[in-house]
Structures are given as C-alpha cells and as structure tokens.
Image: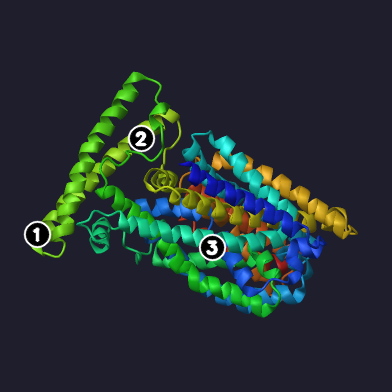
C-alpha cells in the first residue's frame, strides 16, 4: 500500500462521514429518520437494496469461494427473481397500504402484540449476528493491509459506519448506498480487467478458463438431489426461494428500504431491478475468484496459505521445520503445476494431446491441494481451532498484486460494500428497537424527538454489539456461508408467521406464537445435528411454523 492508495481510502472515509452529517441536518422526525418520509425514488431504493446485499462479505467471501470452489455458489441465487415477483405482488402493496414503519408492526395488526414482539426479538438476534460478520469482512482486509490486530480494525470500521448511520438515519444510508454501489462496480470492473491483463502473453482468457474448467471451477449447475449438499439446482430453486422470500419480505433491513419508497410502483421497480441484476453481478464476483485462481496457477511462487505471517503461529522448532518443508515442497509443486498448465493451455484443442496434458495438470493441481491441506492441518493444530484462509484470498491478491492507486480503489470498494450493508442493518436494528420494543412496550406516547433519540442510542448499541461479535465471526470460515447460515437459523420460521397471516384466515396470535417457537426450535435442532444442508432449514422452518400455527389456532383454548 502506497501513500496514494491510503489517500484514496482516507478521502472515501471522510466523504462518507461528511455526507452523513449533511443528510442528518434535514428533517429528523421519526418518519424522516426511519422511513425518509417515504420520499425515495425506485432507483435509489433499488441501488440501496443491491448495495445492502453486495456487502464486503460478497467481495471478500464470494471471491474466496470462487477461488476454492468455482461458480457453484451462483446456484444459491437462482430463486431470487421468482421471490422478487412474489413479493412485488404480496408484501410490497400489503406493507405500503398498511402504512407501517416495520414489518413486525404489520403482524400486530393481523395477530397481536405478542407476535410483533417475538418476531422483533428474533429479527434483532439474527440481524445482530449477521452484522457482526459484515463488519468482520473488511476488518480482515484492513488487518492484512496494516498488520494491525483485527480488534483494532474492527473498531475502526464499526466506528465510521455507526457514526454516519447515527447522524443521518435511513436517508443518509440510502444515498450513501447509491454512491458506494458506484465505487463497488468500478472496483469490480477494474479487478476483472487487471486479472485478464496479467495472464502470461501466451495464455488468452479462453486458455485460462480452460485451465479453470479442467478443475471443475466453471461448473455452475449441479443437478444432484442431495439434502446434505449445499449448492445444487434444487437447493437454489426451492430452498433458497424461502430464504429470499424471508430476507426481502420479513427482514426489516430490506423491508425498510421499500417502505421508504415514494409509492408502491417505485418499491416494485426497486425489487425488480435486483431480480434482473443480482445473478449476473454475483456470477462476476465468483468469476473474479476463479480468475484469481488462474492467476496464481501461472504466477511463480504463489503463497502456500493466504494468511500473512501464518508461520508465527508455531511455537516449537519441530512445527516450524515441518511448515518450512511444506512451503519448499509447495514451491516445487506449483512450478510443476505452472509448467503443466502452460502445456495444457497450448494443447487443449488438440484431442489426444489435450487429454494427456490435462491429466498431468490435474495431477499437479492435486499435489498442490494436498500440500495446502497439510499446511492448514498444521496451522489448526498450532492454533487449536480450524484453519480456513478463504477470506484472505482477495486481500492477499489485492495488496500484493494490484498497481499503485488500484489497490486503494479495491480497498475502497470493500469498505464501501461493508459500510453500505452494515449501515442499513444498523438502521434497521435501531428502527425495530425504537418502534417495536421501546415505543410499543415502554413509551406508547413517545414524541418524535424521543423516538429519534432512542433510535440513535440503539444504533450506537448495535454498532458496539456488531464490533464485539465481529471478533469471533472472523474465525468461522467463509464469510458468505457464515452469514447465510446464521440467517437460515431464523428466516424460515419468521417467514412462516407472515405466510400463516396470509394463507389462514382463522389463524390467531396464539397460533402464530406457537408456530414460531416450535418452528424455530425444530430448525435449531436440525442445524445442531447437520441432518440437512443449511439452505433447506428455511423451507423446513416455514412449513413447520405454518402447520403448527394453523393447528394451534384451532385448539379450543382461549388466547
């Protein structure tokens, strides 16, 4: 990182805070702070929704996922367009016509205050966990860039984001999301261009993709039906449908966006924009990870692991010597792989010759994978916890390979993605805390000024919560999997309560609460046993909640 790179990052941070203060000078009524007076156009809302999804988790975690596993993760998003169409027909007009501030306020009108309070509490727990992961992702990058402890970088990221969210409310969040989405897209395009430009002169983009394809990294569709397999067409079309319906239809961090839209039509257009753009955008991020893999196949001396200074974890001479031997073996193995890949790139269109060079390359790749697994096992033994460097692929590449200025732009894109997501989530957490808990349970007659003050204090609290959780979240593996796993523990049952309200006119508050509690308990039990892949928990939780809720509503007892 050069002075120019840091100037780019520092200027970006300063601009965000200043813009948050500018937005905060505008109307600070409860409606203005929590819903932007329902004044945002569809482009602003659509880009804000998109920026909330395209977090640093996506840029850091999905890039590492693409490096390690290829394009298969894109199947996770196959149901997104279907979910958006369903929500445009149901949730958007329902929430807008009800003129609610939160999704859970709607449940009180349909059921009772118990249903509102309980769903609010589960949302706060689920989104509080997810926000910790969102802040952990850029903290990893900043830690790698500066060599600072992750605790320090977590506090730096969390403080800046919390500050402009506290001051500006949802309007500042939404407008900053639009600007940050621009930075993200520019950074992504620049990274993809550079990765293609950095291929060896004798290797074209097509040749590089052939090399990646030989390892299975270009396989985007898996037709197997297996409950334990995370990413298949079936989990993407069926299980993910329930997750997206819940995320965009029941999660306040998303519902708040289209509640701030100026009309039902604007809210619908914002969701349809995401239906069209999200899958190609996610595929581009995964492709960036695949191209980083290709880059390191042809680069001399790629890293054994993507964690800088990993050898410092070893406390005894025997472990250090074993790791040093693995590093030496890996250098020899990657050179053999590079030569095999060059031969395969030259012959992949030559029939029998291609088959031979392909097998030689795959054997060399298998040896490299074996040595990386051995290094990971050695590090896990030294640290006492599982070792996974998938979240360090992007920062390692960006900081070691990008030219002056572009490294700063890449970091700014990561920070933009992190702050757009975490700011939106902090604002949603504050809204739910202030309105669904404080106003509903403690101060029904609270003034606008009091609610805004409580919202700001709640933002500070949740910002501190997220920073504390981020210190733990950084150790849990691939960020993009962790955040969706957290969501799957809650989303299915939450969706089930809303589905119960829509499909069963005889459902009551007692049934909604019973269905939610039993549905959530069943999901947590399945999650603890790993009986099914986590995406299926969303469908199971929703169906269990609806069935139990419908039955409990018909029991001959008073609520």
- Where is residue 111? Give x, y as percent: 76, 67
Which of these two is toward me, 229 or 279?
A: 279
Give the class, few, some or many, for how many residues have Cα within 10 Å of label 3's Cα (few <14, many ≥20). some
Where does label 2 land, which residue? 377
Between label 3 and label 2, give the one nearer the viewer: 3
Q: Is residue 527 above or below residue 219?
A: above
Asked whether, in this view, residue 108 is left or right of residue 64, the answer is right
Where does label 1 land, which residue? 353
Question: How far is the residue under mark 1 from the one under mark 3?
Answer: 46 Å
Q: Quadrant of the C terminus?
A: bottom right
The residue sitting at 16% across, 56% down in the picture is 344
Question: How far is the residue under mark 3 from the one under mark 2?
Answer: 40 Å
Whether residues under marks 3 and 2 lie with C-beta atoms below 8 angstroms apart, the answer is no
* Mark 1 vs 3, N-terminal side: 3
* Mark 2 vs 1, N-terminal side: 1
Where does label 3 land, which residue? 182
Between label 2 and label 1, give the one nearer the viewer: 1
Between label 1 and label 3, give the one nearer the viewer: 3
Q: Quadrant of the N terminus?
A: top left
Give the class, few, some or many, for how many residues have Cα within 10 Å of label 1's Cα (few <14, many ≥20). some
Q: Quadrant of residue 437?
A: bottom right
């Amino acid at each position: 990182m050069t002075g120019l790179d840091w100037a780019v990052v520092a200027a970006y941070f300063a601009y965000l805070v200043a813009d948050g203060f500018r937005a905060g000078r505008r109307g600070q009524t409860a409606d203005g702070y929590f819903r932007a007076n329902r004044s945002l156009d569809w482009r602003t809302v659509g880009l804000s929704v998109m920026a909330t999804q395209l977090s640093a988790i996506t840029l850091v975690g999905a890039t590492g996922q693409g490096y390690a596993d290829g394009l298969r993760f894109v199947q996770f998003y196959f149901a997104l367009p279907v979910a958006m169409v369903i929500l445009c027909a149901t949730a958007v007009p329902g929430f807008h016509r009800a003129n609610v501030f939160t999704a859970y306020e709607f449940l009180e009108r349909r059921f009772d205050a118990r249903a509102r309070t309980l769903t609010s509490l589960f949302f706060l727990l689920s989104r509080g966990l997810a926000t910790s992961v969102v802040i952990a992702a850029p903290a990893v990058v900043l830690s790698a860039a500066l060599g600072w402890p992750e605790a320090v970088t977590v506090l730096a990221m969390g403080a800046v984001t919390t500050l402009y969210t506290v001051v500006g409310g949802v309007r500042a969040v939404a407008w900053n999301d639009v600007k940050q989405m621009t930075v993200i897209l520019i950074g992504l395009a620049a990274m993809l261009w550079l990765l293609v430009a950095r291929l060896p002169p004798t290797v074209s983009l097509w040749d590089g993709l052939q090399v990646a394809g030989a390892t299975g990294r270009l396989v985007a569709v898996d037709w197997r039906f297996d409950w334990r397999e995370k990413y298949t067409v079936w989990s993407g079309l069926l299980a993910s449908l329930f997750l997206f319906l819940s995320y965009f239809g029941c999660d306040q961090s998303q519902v708040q966006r289209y509640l701030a839209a100026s009309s039902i039509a604007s809210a619908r257009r914002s969701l349809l924009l995401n239906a069209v753009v999200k899958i190609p955008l996610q595929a581009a991020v995964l492709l960036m990870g695949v191209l980083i893999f290709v880059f390191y196949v042809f680069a001399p001396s790629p890293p054994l692991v993507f964690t800088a200074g990993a050898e410092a974890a070893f406390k005894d001479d025997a472990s250090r010597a074993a790791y040093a031997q693995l590093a030496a073996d890996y250098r020899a193995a990657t050179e053999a792989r590079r030569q095999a890949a060059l031969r395969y790139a030259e012959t992949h269109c030559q029939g029998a010759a291609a088959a031979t060079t392909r097998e030689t390359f795959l054997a060399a790749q298998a040896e490299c994978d074996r040595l990386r697994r051995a290094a990971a096992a050695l590090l896990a033994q030294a640290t006492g916890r599982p070792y996974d460097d998938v979240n360090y692929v992007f920062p390692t590449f960006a900081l070691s390979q990008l030219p002056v200025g572009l490294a700063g732009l890449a970091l700014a894109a990561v920070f933009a993605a992190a702050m757009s997501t975490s700011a939106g989530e902090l604002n949603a957490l504050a809204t739910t805390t202030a309105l669904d808990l404080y106003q509903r349970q403690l101060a029904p007659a609270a003034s606008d000024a009091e609610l805004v003050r409580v919202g700001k204090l709640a933002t500070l609290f949740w910002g501190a919560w997220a920073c504390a959780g981020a210190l733990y979240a950084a150790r849990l593996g691939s960020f993009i999997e962790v955040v969706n796993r957290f969501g799957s523990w809650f989303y299915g049952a939450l969706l089930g309560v809303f589905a119960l309200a829509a499909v069963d006119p005889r459902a009551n508050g007692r049934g909604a609460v019973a269905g939610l509690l039993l549905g959530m308990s069943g999901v947590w039990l399945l999650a603890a046993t790993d009986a099914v892949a986590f995406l299926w928990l969303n469908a199971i939780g929703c169906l269990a909640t609806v069935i139990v809720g419908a039955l409990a509503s018909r029991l001959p007892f008073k609520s």
